[in-house]
Amino acid sequence: MKILSVIFIIFIYSIYENKYYKIHNIKIKSEKVHKKVKFIQISDYHLNPFINLKSLERHINKFQADFVFLTGDFINRSTRPKDFSKMEDFLKIFSSEVFFVSGNHEEENNNCSLFFDILNKYHVKLFDNKNAIRGDININGKFYNGKTSNLKCLNDKYNILLIHDPLDFIYNEDKNFDLVLSGHLHGGQVRLPFIGAFIDPYFNLFPKYSKGFYKIRQSILYITSGMGSKFILRTFNPCEMIFFTLDNED
Protein backbone atom coordinates (compact mmCIF):
# COMPACT_ATOMS: atom_id res chain seq x y z
CA MET A 1 0.00 0.00 0.00
CA LYS A 2 2.85 2.38 0.85
CA ILE A 3 4.50 1.68 -2.50
CA LEU A 4 1.27 2.48 -4.35
CA SER A 5 0.95 5.70 -2.36
CA VAL A 6 4.48 6.74 -3.31
CA ILE A 7 3.84 5.95 -6.98
CA PHE A 8 0.62 7.97 -6.88
CA ILE A 9 2.38 10.96 -5.30
CA ILE A 10 5.16 10.84 -7.91
CA PHE A 11 2.55 10.66 -10.69
CA ILE A 12 0.64 13.69 -9.39
CA TYR A 13 3.85 15.65 -8.88
CA SER A 14 4.97 14.82 -12.42
CA ILE A 15 1.73 16.25 -13.80
CA TYR A 16 2.44 19.41 -11.80
CA GLU A 17 5.97 19.59 -13.27
CA ASN A 18 4.55 19.25 -16.80
CA LYS A 19 1.85 21.88 -16.28
CA TYR A 20 3.53 24.73 -14.41
CA TYR A 21 6.44 25.86 -16.52
CA LYS A 22 9.16 28.31 -15.58
CA ILE A 23 10.43 31.23 -17.63
CA HIS A 24 14.16 31.88 -17.51
CA ASN A 25 15.31 35.34 -18.55
CA ILE A 26 18.90 35.18 -19.76
CA LYS A 27 21.02 38.17 -20.77
CA ILE A 28 24.05 37.75 -23.01
CA LYS A 29 26.56 40.47 -23.82
CA SER A 30 28.36 40.60 -27.15
CA GLU A 31 30.18 43.38 -28.95
CA LYS A 32 29.10 41.80 -32.24
CA VAL A 33 25.60 43.27 -31.93
CA HIS A 34 24.86 46.96 -32.31
CA LYS A 35 21.39 46.91 -30.83
CA LYS A 36 19.41 44.72 -28.48
CA VAL A 37 18.01 41.48 -29.90
CA LYS A 38 15.42 39.36 -28.09
CA PHE A 39 14.59 35.75 -28.85
CA ILE A 40 12.74 32.84 -27.31
CA GLN A 41 13.78 29.21 -27.26
CA ILE A 42 11.20 26.45 -26.84
CA SER A 43 12.08 22.79 -27.15
CA ASP A 44 10.65 19.30 -26.59
CA TYR A 45 7.01 20.37 -26.43
CA HIS A 46 5.75 16.85 -27.25
CA LEU A 47 2.21 18.27 -27.68
CA ASN A 48 2.11 18.72 -23.91
CA PRO A 49 -1.61 18.56 -23.00
CA PHE A 50 -1.06 20.20 -19.62
CA ILE A 51 0.32 23.54 -20.86
CA ASN A 52 -2.08 26.47 -20.67
CA LEU A 53 -1.70 28.12 -24.07
CA LYS A 54 -3.45 31.33 -23.01
CA SER A 55 -0.90 31.80 -20.24
CA LEU A 56 1.90 30.96 -22.66
CA GLU A 57 0.63 33.52 -25.14
CA ARG A 58 0.49 36.29 -22.51
CA HIS A 59 4.10 35.76 -21.51
CA ILE A 60 5.31 35.58 -25.11
CA ASN A 61 3.44 38.71 -26.19
CA LYS A 62 4.76 40.63 -23.19
CA PHE A 63 8.39 39.76 -24.03
CA GLN A 64 8.08 40.99 -27.65
CA ALA A 65 10.78 38.77 -29.12
CA ASP A 66 12.40 39.42 -32.48
CA PHE A 67 12.65 35.67 -33.16
CA VAL A 68 11.34 32.38 -31.83
CA PHE A 69 13.55 29.29 -32.04
CA LEU A 70 11.87 25.87 -31.85
CA THR A 71 14.52 23.21 -31.29
CA GLY A 72 12.71 19.96 -32.03
CA ASP A 73 10.43 17.24 -30.65
CA PHE A 74 7.15 19.11 -30.86
CA ILE A 75 5.30 15.89 -31.64
CA ASN A 76 5.98 12.27 -30.65
CA ARG A 77 7.10 9.50 -32.96
CA SER A 78 3.70 7.87 -32.36
CA THR A 79 1.58 11.01 -32.95
CA ARG A 80 -1.07 10.36 -35.58
CA PRO A 81 -1.79 12.84 -38.38
CA LYS A 82 -5.23 13.66 -36.97
CA ASP A 83 -3.49 15.00 -33.86
CA PHE A 84 -1.06 17.24 -35.73
CA SER A 85 -3.73 19.93 -35.75
CA LYS A 86 -3.15 20.40 -32.01
CA MET A 87 0.08 22.09 -33.00
CA GLU A 88 -1.88 24.79 -34.81
CA ASP A 89 -3.20 26.27 -31.57
CA PHE A 90 0.40 26.47 -30.38
CA LEU A 91 1.67 28.12 -33.58
CA LYS A 92 -1.09 30.74 -33.55
CA ILE A 93 0.55 32.26 -30.48
CA PHE A 94 3.53 33.68 -32.34
CA SER A 95 3.71 36.98 -34.16
CA SER A 96 7.53 36.96 -34.46
CA GLU A 97 9.56 35.16 -37.10
CA VAL A 98 9.78 31.47 -36.15
CA PHE A 99 12.63 29.05 -36.96
CA PHE A 100 12.35 25.28 -36.50
CA VAL A 101 14.80 22.38 -36.44
CA SER A 102 13.57 18.81 -36.12
CA GLY A 103 14.20 16.39 -33.28
CA ASN A 104 14.31 12.63 -33.23
CA HIS A 105 10.55 12.33 -32.72
CA GLU A 106 9.75 14.26 -35.89
CA GLU A 107 12.28 12.27 -37.90
CA GLU A 108 10.99 8.95 -36.53
CA ASN A 109 7.34 9.78 -37.21
CA ASN A 110 6.24 8.15 -40.48
CA ASN A 111 3.98 11.10 -41.27
CA CYS A 112 6.39 13.91 -40.43
CA SER A 113 5.97 15.48 -43.89
CA LEU A 114 2.34 16.21 -43.00
CA PHE A 115 3.49 17.85 -39.79
CA PHE A 116 5.98 19.96 -41.73
CA ASP A 117 3.10 21.04 -43.99
CA ILE A 118 1.40 22.52 -40.93
CA LEU A 119 4.57 24.39 -39.99
CA ASN A 120 4.77 25.78 -43.52
CA LYS A 121 1.14 26.84 -43.30
CA TYR A 122 2.10 29.13 -40.41
CA HIS A 123 5.22 30.40 -42.20
CA VAL A 124 7.61 28.64 -39.83
CA LYS A 125 11.06 28.40 -41.39
CA LEU A 126 12.28 24.81 -41.51
CA PHE A 127 16.01 25.15 -41.00
CA ASP A 128 17.73 22.01 -42.25
CA ASN A 129 21.37 22.71 -43.07
CA LYS A 130 20.59 26.37 -43.70
CA ASN A 131 21.60 29.77 -42.46
CA ALA A 132 19.97 33.19 -42.56
CA ILE A 133 21.23 36.63 -41.63
CA ARG A 134 19.01 38.95 -39.64
CA GLY A 135 20.82 42.17 -38.85
CA ASP A 136 23.82 41.32 -36.66
CA ILE A 137 22.66 37.72 -36.20
CA ASN A 138 23.65 34.74 -38.34
CA ILE A 139 21.15 31.95 -37.62
CA ASN A 140 22.08 28.37 -38.53
CA GLY A 141 19.93 25.27 -38.20
CA LYS A 142 20.49 21.54 -38.38
CA PHE A 143 17.75 18.89 -38.47
CA TYR A 144 18.17 15.77 -36.35
CA ASN A 145 20.76 13.56 -38.09
CA GLY A 146 20.97 16.23 -40.78
CA LYS A 147 23.92 17.52 -42.78
CA THR A 148 26.08 20.47 -41.78
CA SER A 149 27.80 21.36 -45.05
CA ASN A 150 26.05 24.72 -45.41
CA LEU A 151 26.40 25.89 -41.81
CA LYS A 152 28.42 29.08 -41.63
CA CYS A 153 30.21 31.08 -38.97
CA LEU A 154 30.76 34.69 -40.03
CA ASN A 155 33.38 36.79 -38.29
CA ASP A 156 31.32 39.97 -38.31
CA LYS A 157 28.08 38.36 -37.09
CA TYR A 158 26.82 36.80 -33.87
CA ASN A 159 26.55 33.16 -34.90
CA ILE A 160 23.74 31.01 -33.50
CA LEU A 161 23.23 27.30 -34.15
CA LEU A 162 19.88 25.60 -33.56
CA ILE A 163 20.29 21.85 -33.04
CA HIS A 164 18.07 19.40 -31.20
CA ASP A 165 20.59 17.03 -29.64
CA PRO A 166 23.47 18.79 -27.85
CA LEU A 167 25.58 15.63 -28.02
CA ASP A 168 25.40 15.86 -31.80
CA PHE A 169 27.07 19.26 -31.57
CA ILE A 170 29.55 18.23 -28.88
CA TYR A 171 30.84 15.15 -30.67
CA ASN A 172 30.15 15.76 -34.38
CA GLU A 173 30.47 19.47 -35.11
CA ASP A 174 33.79 21.31 -35.43
CA LYS A 175 32.59 24.85 -36.15
CA ASN A 176 32.67 27.40 -33.35
CA PHE A 177 29.40 29.25 -32.89
CA ASP A 178 28.86 32.07 -30.43
CA LEU A 179 25.74 30.37 -29.07
CA VAL A 180 24.31 26.89 -29.60
CA LEU A 181 20.69 26.26 -28.56
CA SER A 182 19.56 22.69 -27.97
CA GLY A 183 17.25 20.46 -25.94
CA HIS A 184 16.58 16.71 -26.20
CA LEU A 185 17.97 15.70 -22.79
CA HIS A 186 14.91 16.94 -20.85
CA GLY A 187 17.15 18.34 -18.15
CA GLY A 188 18.05 14.80 -17.19
CA GLN A 189 14.33 13.85 -17.03
CA VAL A 190 14.65 13.02 -13.32
CA ARG A 191 16.66 15.38 -11.12
CA LEU A 192 17.59 15.09 -7.47
CA PRO A 193 17.74 18.06 -5.09
CA PHE A 194 21.29 19.37 -4.54
CA ILE A 195 22.66 16.76 -6.95
CA GLY A 196 21.20 17.47 -10.39
CA ALA A 197 20.40 15.11 -13.22
CA PHE A 198 19.88 11.51 -12.16
CA ILE A 199 19.03 9.87 -15.49
CA ASP A 200 18.72 11.14 -19.05
CA PRO A 201 16.71 9.90 -22.08
CA TYR A 202 19.64 7.65 -22.99
CA PHE A 203 19.32 6.03 -19.53
CA ASN A 204 22.73 7.34 -18.51
CA LEU A 205 23.00 7.77 -14.76
CA PHE A 206 24.23 11.14 -13.49
CA PRO A 207 24.91 12.42 -17.02
CA LYS A 208 27.60 14.99 -17.65
CA TYR A 209 25.29 17.13 -19.80
CA SER A 210 21.66 17.82 -18.85
CA LYS A 211 20.62 21.50 -18.79
CA GLY A 212 22.09 24.98 -18.62
CA PHE A 213 25.27 26.51 -20.04
CA TYR A 214 28.39 24.63 -21.10
CA LYS A 215 31.62 25.81 -22.74
CA ILE A 216 32.33 23.50 -25.69
CA ARG A 217 35.57 24.39 -27.47
CA GLN A 218 35.04 28.07 -28.40
CA SER A 219 31.24 27.86 -28.31
CA ILE A 220 28.70 28.50 -25.59
CA LEU A 221 26.14 25.69 -25.52
CA TYR A 222 22.76 26.08 -23.85
CA ILE A 223 20.60 23.03 -23.15
CA THR A 224 17.00 23.62 -22.14
CA SER A 225 15.00 21.01 -20.23
CA GLY A 226 12.08 21.69 -22.58
CA MET A 227 8.33 22.19 -22.34
CA GLY A 228 7.20 18.58 -22.14
CA SER A 229 8.14 14.95 -22.44
CA LYS A 230 6.96 11.81 -24.16
CA PHE A 231 6.68 10.36 -20.66
CA ILE A 232 4.71 12.16 -17.97
CA LEU A 233 7.51 11.51 -15.47
CA ARG A 234 9.48 14.65 -14.58
CA THR A 235 10.68 15.09 -11.02
CA PHE A 236 12.33 18.22 -9.61
CA ASN A 237 12.58 19.23 -13.23
CA PRO A 238 9.83 21.65 -14.30
CA CYS A 239 9.12 22.57 -17.89
CA GLU A 240 10.75 25.77 -19.02
CA MET A 241 10.78 28.42 -21.72
CA ILE A 242 13.85 30.59 -22.28
CA PHE A 243 13.78 34.34 -22.97
CA PHE A 244 17.14 35.57 -24.25
CA THR A 245 18.22 39.20 -24.49
CA LEU A 246 21.39 39.80 -26.52
CA ASP A 247 22.98 43.22 -26.18
CA ASN A 248 26.33 44.99 -26.32
CA GLU A 249 25.81 46.42 -22.84
CA ASP A 250 25.41 44.77 -19.44
Image: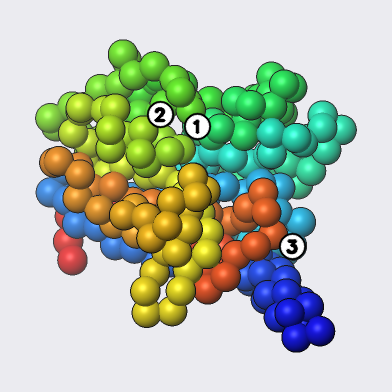
Residue assigned mark 1: 101
Residue assigned mark 3: 50
Q: Residues within 10 Å of mark 2 (few under 14, many from 20)?
A: many
Q: Which picture quadrant has residue 174?
A: top left
Residue 67 located left or right of residue 177:
right
Secondary structure found at label 1: loop
Q: Along the line of sight, which residue is nearer the eye, 96 or 154?
A: 154
Circles 1 and 3, Cβ within 8 Å, touching? The answer is: no
Distance in Å between CA atoms under marks 2 and 3:
28 Å
Please state which amino acid type lies under the numbered disc 3: Phe
Residue at the top extreme, as displayed? 149
Q: Along the line of sight, which residue is nearer the eye, 197 or 79?
A: 197
Locate the C terminus and report the quarter of the image it occupies. bottom left
Q: Along the line of sight, which residue is nearer the eye, 31 or 42?
A: 42
- Residue 241 seen by the camera: no
Distance in Å between CA atoms under marks 1 and 3:
23 Å
Mark 1 or mark 3: whose residue is earlier in sequence? 3
Secondary structure found at label 3: loop
Residue assigned mark 2: 141
Secondary structure found at label 2: strand
Circles 2 and 1, Cβ within 8 Å, touching? The answer is: yes
Please state which amino acid type lies under the numbered disc 2: Gly
Identify the residue at image location x=42%, y=64%.
Answer: 197
Q: Can you give x and y, in whole percent of width and height, for residue 76 in the image?
A: 69, 39
Residue at the right extreme, as displayed? 82
Q: Can you give x and y, in whole percent of width and height, for residue 90 in the image?
A: 70, 47
- Residue 239 seen by the camera: yes
Q: Which picture quadrant has residue 138?
A: top left
Mark 2 or mark 3: whose residue is earlier in sequence? 3
Q: Residues within 10 Å of mark 1 (few under 14, many from 20)?
A: many
Q: Which of marks 2 and 3 is in front?
A: 3
